[in-house]
Image: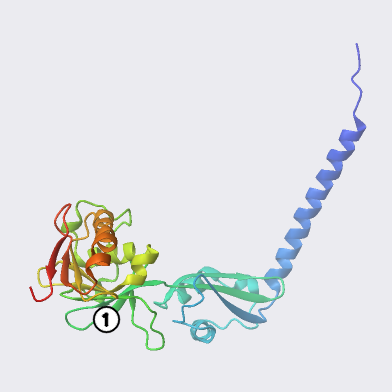
Amino acid sequence: MKIKKINWKKLLIFSMWTIMSIGLVVTLGFVNSVQKELKCKRVLVTFNGNVQQEFVDQQEILELIKSKQKLIGKPLGSINTTLLEKIIMSNPFVQKAEVYSSVDGNVNVAVTQRNPLVRIITMKDEQFYIDDNGNFVPVSTKYSPPVLVANGFIFDRYSQQKINFVISGVNDSASQTKPMIEQVYELAQFIEADTFWSAQAEQIYVNENQELELIPRTGNHRIVFGNAENLTEKFNRLMIFYTQGLNKTGWNNYSIINLKYRNQVVCTKINS
């Protein structure tokens, strides 16, 4: 019977990796144990995402935390980071909060502010924003982001809190049956996603017939969309009319450009 030789080199390498792995687990366990007993020295607040948003600052976040929990001097292991995140997100301008401790004794707070897409002004002069996730955001007394404004015959209230709308595209054939606030949101979302139209669009207006209108920055006309159905096709027709029509006839000759009729651009001349 032939006896198989032991590969001592492989056995040695395997043993070394095993010892190193055990040592690493023990070290991490020790560090974790020490960190849990380590007391909080500072609370550091940083901001992620769009740093141009100025709804809240570091001091406001720190004061919000302090009003609910005293962290300085408290063992890191006893700090409920999940609860802290919920406390911070109670601020309506905060979209996301991440709280974690570090071996230097700091509690780190990473805050992402909400990103408003459109400012709503209702028929009763109630004002609020809708952010890029469809959440309603109150108007701030300290910061007004430069976003599209929508007004007119809008009756939705801030108390509704959120648009129950899945952002799946702008060519939904059922757009005409959606609440007007959702259609305003769809139009604002489409405009924001396009560099040219976001620069050209100044205001969304909902007329007395519950139709969407767009007020551009250039020209004396208003653009009637009807509803938020087939926005891509409507904007394509508008772009063709802009480049092949208005560039030749002039930008101030029409009062209305109507896109609500399929495959048509119906214009009303000024003083006609």
Report the side of 21 relative to 159 (left or right): right
Query: Foreground residue, 154 or 234?
Result: 234
| Residue positioned most to the bottom | 141
| Nearer the observer, 106 or 263 | 263
Q: Quadrant of the N terminus?
A: top right
**Residue at the (70%, 72%) spot, across then down:** 37
Q: Which of these two is toward me, 201 or 269?
A: 269
| Residue 163 appears in the figure | no
Task: Determine the secondary structure under disc 1.
Answer: strand
Residue at x 66%, y 79% (from the top left corner)? 40
Seen in the picture, residue 64 relative to 80 is either above or below; the reply is below
Q: Looking at the rendering, which quadrant does residue 231 occupy?
A: bottom left
Q: Position of residue 66 (x, y in %)?
A: 53, 85
Q: Residue 224, position in %: x, y?
A: 17, 66
Residue 173 shows up from this direction: yes
Residue at x-position 26% and y-position 59%: 244
Residue farthest front in this picture: 248
Q: Quadrant of residue 253?
A: bottom left
Q: Position of residue 173 (x, y in %)?
A: 20, 51
Please, what is the three-letter code of the amino acid marked with disc 1? Gln
Quick check: 175 above or below 82? above
Question: Is 259 on the left-hand or right-hand side of 235?
Answer: left
